[in-house]
Image (cartoon, rainbow, N blue to C red):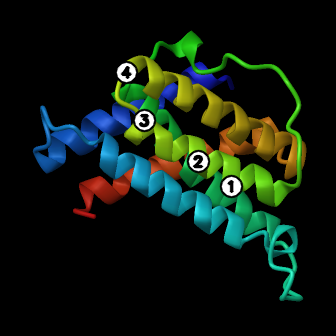
Amino acid sequence: MDLDKLYAMQKELDRHIIQEKGLEGQDLLTNSVLALQVEIGELANELPEFFKHWSNKKNNYDNALKEYVDCLHFFLSIANQLGLEDGDLFTHDDDLIGTTARIFTELLHHVGKIELSETRNLKVSNYKAAFFIFANLGVDRLGLDWQEICKAYVKKNIINHQRQIEGY
C-alpha cells in the first residue's frame, strides 16, 4: 500500500469527524499540531533506551508501532488541513544525522513551527521537514517496516471511524 491510499483514508476520516462534530469551517490546525506533539511524546516514551539515561526500561517496539501510527494519522490530517496534494508529502531524500533523541527533538521543533509559522509556505516547508524526519525515524532508526506501518494504519483508521460512530 502506498502513502496516497493512506492519505485518502485520512481525508475521509477527517471529513467524518468534522461532520460528526459540527466543525465545518473551523481552523483545527493548532489542535492537530498539539495532538501530534503529544503523540510524538508518547512514541518517544515507548523507546526509553534512546533518551532515558536514568532508566533500565527497554524499548517496546510493539507499542511504538501503535504510537507511530497515531502520529501518522495526525501528520496526514495536518497535510489535509494545509491542502497538500498526494505527491507533495515528501520532498527530501537524505539520511538523518545525530542521535535518535536529537532527531525526536528536531521533529518536535519542526512540528511546532507548522503552527507558529506566519505564512502557508513556511507552514508547508516545516511540515515537509517534519514529515521527512518522521518517516525516516520510523524506517531507518526504529526499524519499522513500511508494509507493517500501513497495515497498522488501516487497522487504527477503522477503529477511529468506529469510535466516531460510537460518540468518542
> What is the count of numbered marks?
4
Callout 1 secondary element: helix
Which residue occupies 87% across, 79% down?
Answer: 58
Which residue occupies 60% across, 58% down?
Answer: 40
Reading the image, the residue beneath label 1 is: 105
Residues under labels 1 and 4: Cα distance? 23 Å
Q: Position of residue 143 (x, y in %)?
A: 89, 48
Q: Which one is nearer the viewer's eye here, 67 or 102?
A: 102
Image depth: mark 2 or mark 3 in front? 2
Callout 2 secondary element: helix
Callout 3 secondary element: helix
Dots 1, 3 in contact, CB < 8 A: no
- Residue 48 makes an appearance in the image: yes
Q: Earlier in the sequence, mark 2 or mark 4?
A: 2
Q: Earlier in the sequence, mark 2 or mark 3?
A: 3
Reading the image, the residue beneath label 4 is: 120
Dots 1, 2 in contact, CB < 8 A: yes
Q: Earlier in the sequence, mark 1 or mark 4?
A: 1
Quadrant in the picture for the N terminus? top right
Which residue occupies 84% across, 85% down?
Answer: 57
Q: Earlier in the sequence, mark 3 or mark 4?
A: 3
Residue 132 position (above or below residue 63): above
Dots 1, 4 in contact, CB < 8 A: no
Residues under labels 3 and 4: Cα distance? 12 Å
Callout 4 secondary element: helix
Residue 7 appears left or right of 149: left
Reading the image, the residue beneath label 2 is: 109
Residue 67 appears left or right of 133: left
Image depth: mark 3 or mark 4 in front? 4
Quadrant in the picture for the C terminus? bottom left
Task: Give the label on residue 78, or none.
Answer: 3
Q: Amino acid at mark 1?
A: Thr
